[in-house]
Image (tube, coloured by chain):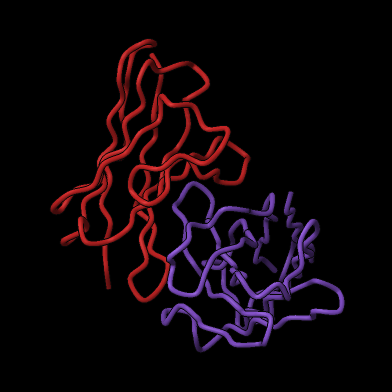
Chain colours: A red, B purple
């Protein structure tokens, strides 16, 4: 089965940039989607198809995907960005990453 | 704006069958553009896709759960449902219904709020 590996946690100061990686075998050949999940809430789509943003998602959220790593970048981090983030691909079924907790210092 | 809402018992006994229903509003399940999924998340853990259904009744399940899962649809009520049999404590999770696509060519763009199901005697 296809495995997506994320770092368990990322810490970042307000105003700085957070980068969350998602590793998978030749993930660059797949479309990667990213979800933000705050405590007690359902996930929210923040980036789709590697680098596109749904309406209403700030431009501070961006994505890239190449080789064996996809990356979600959050620029000018705000306190409200503190959440768990999951990457996701399709590999004969929906596969989610292990999740990364972003802490704003 | 599409909205999804899960409903069903919050407590199920071990070895019994978990049953949940998802009611879709703001759009028709029968529109044909989407596949309707169930996804779960054990407390403090990550997301696991359970399976999906098309309005025609076509289903596809996660192989890891396939032997215990049944997903059905009621287009007249704009609902789809999940049954998970022979549950154990490992099936304790928040269960989400969500909207996606057949081959994942679209992201999961709408989620229900989730419902916690606890398996305990």
Would residue A28 be found to the left or right of residue A57 on screen?
left
- Left or right: residue B7 versus residue B31 is right
> In which quadrant is the C terminus of chain A drawn?
top left
Residue B6 % position (x, y)? 75, 60
Residue B45 percent across, percent down from the top left: 45, 51
- Residue, x 30% and y 29% (percent of image)? A10
Q: Is residue B58 left or right of residue A79?
A: right
Q: Residue at x 55, y 43 (%)?
A: A44
Work out which quarter of the rendered image holds the N terminus of chain A and state it: bottom left
Q: Is residue B62 or residue B119 the one in the foreground?
A: B62
Residue B2 image offset from top left, x and y in percent = 73, 54
Above or below residue A35? Residue A97 is: below
Q: Is residue A104 above or below residue B56?
A: above
Residue drawn at point x = 65 percent, y = 75 percent: B32
Residue A25's quadrant in the figure? bottom left
Q: Is residue A76 above or below residue A102?
A: above
What residue sits 70% from the left and 69% below the top? B121
Outermost residue toward the left?
A: A67
Q: How many marks?
A: 0
Decide which of B115, A45 is in the foreground and name it. A45
Residue A17, above or below B5? above
Q: Position of residue B97 (x, y in %)?
A: 65, 62
Residue placed most toward the observer, B27 or A42: B27
Q: Residue furthest right?
A: B76
């Amino acid at each position: 089965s296809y495995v997506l590996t994320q770092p368990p946690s990322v810490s970042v100061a307000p105003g700085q940039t957070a980068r969350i990686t998602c590793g998978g075998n030749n993930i660059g050949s797949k479309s990667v989607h990213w979800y933000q999940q705050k405590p007690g809430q359902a996930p929210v789509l923040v980036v789709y198809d590697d680098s596109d943003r749904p309406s209403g998602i700030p431009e501070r959220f961006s994505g890239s995907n190449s080789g064996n790593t996809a990356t979600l970048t959050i620029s000018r981090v705000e306190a409200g960005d503190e959440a768990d983030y999951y990457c996701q691909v399709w590999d004969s079924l929906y596969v989610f990453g292990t999740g990364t907790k972003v802490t704003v210092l | 704006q599409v909205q999804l809402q899960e409903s069903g018992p919050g407590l199920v006994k071990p070895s019994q069958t978990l049953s949940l229903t998802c009611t879709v509003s703001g759009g028709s399940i029968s529109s044909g553009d989407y596949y309707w999924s169930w996804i779960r998340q054990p407390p403090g853990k990550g997301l696991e896709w359970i399976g999906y259904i098309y309005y025609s009744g076509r289903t596809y399940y996660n192989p890891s759960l396939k032997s215990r899962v049944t997903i059905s649809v009621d287009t007249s009520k704009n609902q789809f449902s999940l049954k998970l049999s022979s549950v154990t404590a490992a099936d304790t999770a928040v269960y989400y219904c969500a909207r996606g696509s057949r081959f994942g060519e679209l992201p999961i763009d709408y989620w229900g709020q989730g419902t916690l199901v606890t398996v305990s005697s």
